[in-house]
Image (cartoon, rainbow, N blue to C red):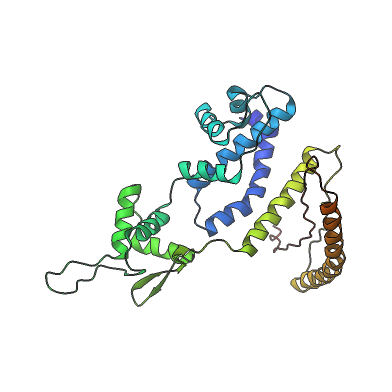
Amino acid sequence: MDTEKKLPSATALAESLLLAEPLVMWCLRHGVGHGQLSKALKILFYEQAVNAVSASGNKVNDSTLSLVSGLHRGDIQAFKLASQVSLGGVEKQADQSTRRSVLDNSQRISPVHQVLARWLSTGVSTTLPIKPVESGEGAQKSTSFTELVHSANRTTSQGFSTALVLHEMERLGLVKVEDEQVRLLLIDNQVKQLGDVERHFIGAGRDFLMAVLTNMAHPDAPPFLEQSVDADGLSAESVLHLQNEFRKWWTKAIQSLVPLAIERNEKDILSASPDRPAHRVRLGVYSYNETMPEQS
């Protein structure tokens, strides 16, 4: 056991938790649990294993991919069929629609979203009483939020209480409770989707990680620009001062970068040719701070 702890993979796994922490925080904020995420990550392990094996010059087959990725051969067969990667030929990255197809066929819906799905599929009012309400003697009880939860519990074989599910749906911004009534928050009859600002931040975070990890994986190649200045032992006021000065600097920098990017884009359009692939670039900076742990 001590030997296993000294393996490079053990160190990488421990460090990967630092990278995964913001991802898990993001998932919990949007109602994605461990079961859903672990299944969804399989397609990424498959894609990156194809990339790694192809780059190494080894033969890309089910056995090699299973060894590199840790996936079962059954998963590899399913992903190979879905993504139409030509094994033994030219690598073909799965597009977003293929990933969506794989996710739709493999993800396990959380109990909270089981309740949401049942609510949307029944076509009942977007406002439900928390508990069943009788309209009169002998009258049939109206559909209630509690009944939706009990129905979902029977499907998932998990006995979460109505109050617990309701609080979680409130936390996720799916419902609002007013006067013992649960109101479903909808926009154009659909649950609110991610906005453009959120998608921008996701893309920025992904590109930053790719720059860092690519530089680490290929130290002899020309590096992506990835620099930062660390300072600790500061007061909250000093941190705020540094952040404000940094924003002023970035405002001046972007005023020069944007016109230059437009100029280069116009030139590239005029000289575009089918044999020259298009590229994209993200130029950015970031700042982050948090309270330091107390020294023992």
**Residue 292 falls in image quadrant:** bottom right
Left or right, 22 with reference to 39: right
Left or right, 194 with reference to 296: left
> For the point 35% across and 60% down, which residue is it?
119
Residue positioned most to the bottom: 179
**Residue 245 falls in image quadrant:** bottom right
Left or right, 284 with reference to 117: right
Residue positioned most to the left: 138
Percent position of residue 183, x then y: 39, 71
User: In the figure, 166 relative to 203: above or below?
Assistant: below
> For the point 77% across and 74% down, which residue is it?
237
> For the point 33% across and 53% down, which residue is it?
152
Percent position of residue 124, x then y: 31, 65
Name the quarter where the C terminus is drawn: bottom right
Does residue 50 appear in the picture of this structure?
Answer: yes
> For the point 76% across and 62% down, which residue is it?
287
Nearer to the camera, 291 or 36: 36
Does residue 6 appear in the picture of this structure?
Answer: no
Nearer to the camera, 218 or 287: 218
Nearer to the camera, 191 or 222: 191
Percent position of residue 177, x then y: 39, 72
Name the quarter where the N terminus is drawn: top right
Percent position of residue 195, x then y: 59, 64
**Residue 261 falls in image quadrant:** bottom right
Please give the count of numbered marks on the rendered protein. Answer: 0
